[in-house]
Amino acid sequence: MLKVLKDLFEYKELLYALVSRDINARYKQTILGIVWIFFKPIFSMVAMTIVFGKLAKMPSDGIPYALITLSGITLWQFFSIAVMEGASSLVSNSNLITKVYFSRVVLVMAPILVSAVDFLVSLGLFFLLALFYGYFFSTKVILFPVIIIILILIIFGLSLFLATLNLLFRDIKIVIPFVLQLGIYISPVGYLTNIVPEKYLYLFYLNPLVGIIDAMRWCFFPTFGDFNWQAMAISLLWMFLLIFYGVKFFSKFEKKFADYI
């Protein structure tokens, strides 16, 4: 991991250039530009609020249900887009890999940072909605950046592993969207964790997003309840495992990437 941090620092100018390129390419030729970031979470929020909040009448612990769904959606959207683009980062930048040598971890980190920028923008929508409801956050919100750093490390470790697999076996890119589509239903995106029966909780906690989403809501919502230490401990374990084995797997094949393209 120290070598990865050293490589990211050494090639920070290239990392900045790649992030700038991707952000510009994403919004340069769109009429509404960055406003498009808001559309998907708004539509998803409305749909989930109606289905889970109005029809299924899920508990909300005194929190406006639209805020519950939007908090889960913005975080899930960050995770899913970052993982998909991180997984395809080596294949989509194959021309760079074959032309010049540099640490390939930069290619994996760049789309994650681009998705992080999108996440920060979409988070602004969450704050505006909270203002609309007259909902005020507690001082716990200052711990939110720590939660996001943990999530970025989880995404980075997973992306290193998937990007390498995708280079070796191109059909991996077909599997990833299917798994992510399933993942949104087994993650507390549109509902709270407390609706899950106790006998299934530890199986539910095996999903690393459970601890992250619960921690995010704990940071923002004063009435959310106690911090979910059990789920967060599993999320942290996933973070360490994914970083360790992701870096190890990536490093094993890095010198041969050009041969697989």
Image: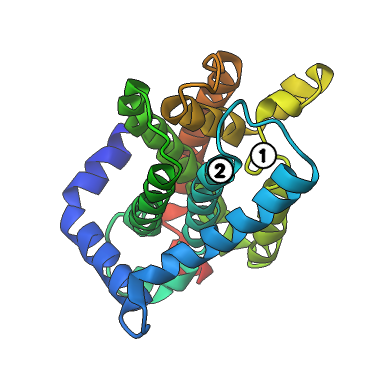
Residue 210: quadrant of the picture: top right
The answer to whether any part of residue 159 appears in the image is: yes
Mark 2 element type: helix
- Of residues 217 and 138, the one nearer the viewer is 138
Residue 189 falls left or right of residue 2: right
Give amino acid for label 1. Ser
- Residue 187 - label: 1
- Of residues 171 and 132, the one nearer the viewer is 132
Residue 177 location, x and y as percent?
Answer: 66, 60
Report the residue at 55% width, 28% height from top: 214
- Of residues 140 and 175, the one nearer the viewer is 140
- Quadrant for the N terminus in the image: top left
Report the residue at 73% width, 46% height from top: 54
Report the residue at 33% width, 33% height from top: 145
Q: Identify residue for label 2.
A: 72
The answer to whether any part of residue 239 appears in the image is: no
Compute the Cα span from label 1 to label 2. Answer: 9 Å
Residue 79 location, x and y as percent?
Answer: 51, 48
Residue 79 falls left or right of residue 95: right
Give amino acid for label 2. Gly
Q: In this picture, is 219 found above or below 48?
A: above
Residue 36 falls left or right of residue 100: right
Report the residue at 38% width, 30% height from top: 137
Residue 135: quadrant of the picture: top left
What crowding class fits label 2: few (fewer than 14 Cα within 10 Å), some (14-19), or many (20 or more)?
many
